Structures are given as C-alpha cells and as structure tokens.
Image (cartoon, rainbow, N blue to C red):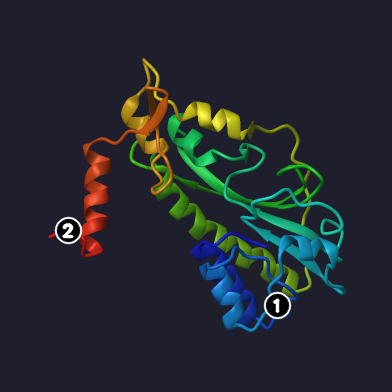
Amino acid sequence: MGKSKDSSVRALDWLVEQGVDVAAVLAPEQTALERSARGHGLPLVSEAELYADPPGDVDVVVSFLFWNLIREPLISLGRVGCLNFHPAPLPDFRGVGGYNVAILEGLPEWGVSCHFVDEHLDTGDLVAVERFPIDPDSETALSLDAKSQEQLAALFESVMQRLLDGEQLPRAPQGEGRYVSRAEFEELRLVRPGDDVSRKLRAFWYPPWPGAVVELDGRRLTVVDDELLAEVARAYRDAGLLP
C-alpha cells in the first residue's frame, strides 16, 4: 500500500527484484506506482477490496506513505505484522506537516522511521529511525521531501532485507510524541504579522499544492517571493515553456 512517489515505485521494484511474492498492491489510479505494479504483473486492489477479501498466507503487510489509517484485519494479517514507513522521525512528528514544522522551527536534523502499525496513527512500536542533517535556512518543504524520500527508500530496503535474511525485527515502544493535525497544519500555513515570512514561504513551498497563504476578501492566496518565483521559472525553462 502506498502513495505514488518515486520512492514507493523504487520500493516495489526492489521487492520484485529480490524475488518477493507480492500478494496485492494498493495504489492510486493513473500513477507511477500503479503502472509499476501492472508492469510487474502484480494484482491491484482497491482499499475496499483489500478489507473485504484480504489475501491469505501473508508474512508482512507493508504501508509505504499510505494515506489512510490502517485497520483490522490488515494490522494482524501478516505473521511478522504490519509495517509502516513514515517520512518523519518518530515519535517526534506524527500525522501531517512534519516537513513544514521542521523548517518553521529551524531544526538542524530530520529523519525517517519504520514502525509496527497499531490501531492509532503513527504510534506503534519502532523498528528503526534514521536521522540526517538538514539546513533549515535553505530547505523548502519540497526539497526536504525529496531528501526524505531517498532516505525512506533506503530504510525500506534495509528493513526488508533483514526480514529476507530471517532476522527478527526489533520493537521499541515510542512513548509520548507530537501529533500535527490537519487543522493545525492549515492554521500554520497562514502568514501572520511578526512571522519570518521568508521562512514560512519556504516551509510551505510544495507546488502545485497551496503554499503559505494570506487571507484577502475571504480568499486564501498563496504567497511567493523572488527566490521561489525564480525556482518556478527554472522549472518552466527546463520544461521548454519559457525561452
């Protein structure tokens, strides 16, 4: 189960290359992950189908950037368990908005995590957390996501190789952590008096999604500065849309 990002495609391709029997793939329609699954001849299922008729004889259920809370029977379906690969350090950042908060708060490092899934969001026992340095004074949400996806794909391969080698995965309770809700995330997006505007713009820069916003005449409008506009211009030129 996963989103359509290059890292999820890399993870699926790696499993196939290792000769792993992938029982089913849940992927958004018309995405690179779906195309990869079709190219490998793997069965594609919807979320409803997966819950109504889960596959049998499963060693491990893998959630890679999956977008919904996972429920039974999937949590207990695999003999090893259900593993989630999360693009943030746990228990520091659960839920959404981790990249944004990391930049807003000037954190010097970031990380990615693998944990066993329980009935709550991002709270199950930890398998591994890999941390790496970042420069919060130059990162954007987009650039930090790109770095995190590379790290997450590497963590996936490392954890799954341990399973293929017959190792028992470690389990460490997370303890207390921080959860950023969708509502909190949307409020953080709003540019307010006294904000470090440049930092906030970078913290929410992830086109084509709305960035940092101001409210005007009842509307929320994304704000860009010259630096971000230059980044867009480079992308347009690379795509042949500008002279």
Which residue is at the front of the view, 67 or 175?
67
Q: Position of residue 143 (x, y in %)?
A: 39, 49
Identify which amino acid the numbered label 1 is placed on. Pro
Which label is found at residue 43?
Answer: 1
Which residue is at the front of the view, 80 or 218?
218
Identify which amino acid the numbered label 2 is placed on. Leu
How far apart in space, not on screen, are marks 2 and 1 (Cα)?
Answer: 42 Å
Mark 2 burial class by Cα count in 10 Å: few <14, some 14-19, many 20+: few
Quadrant in which the N terminus is drawn: bottom right
Question: Compared with residue 55, is residue 133 higher up or lower down, i.e. above or below?
Answer: above
Q: Position of residue 128 (x, y in %)?
A: 67, 53
Q: Quadrant of residue 108?
A: top left
Residue 113 in the figure: left or right of residue 57: left
Work out whether mark 2 precedes mark 1 in sequence or the reverse, and give the earlier one.
Answer: 1
- Which residue is at the far front? 217
Which residue is label 2 attached to?
242
Quadrant in which the C terminus is drawn: bottom left
Q: Quadrant of residue 26?
A: bottom right
Q: Position of residue 5 (x, y in %)?
A: 51, 61
- Kindly state the secondary structure of the residue where label 1 is placed: loop
Which residue is at the front of the view, 8 or 192?
192
Question: Compared with residue 23, is residue 99 higher up or lower down, i.e. above or below?
Answer: above
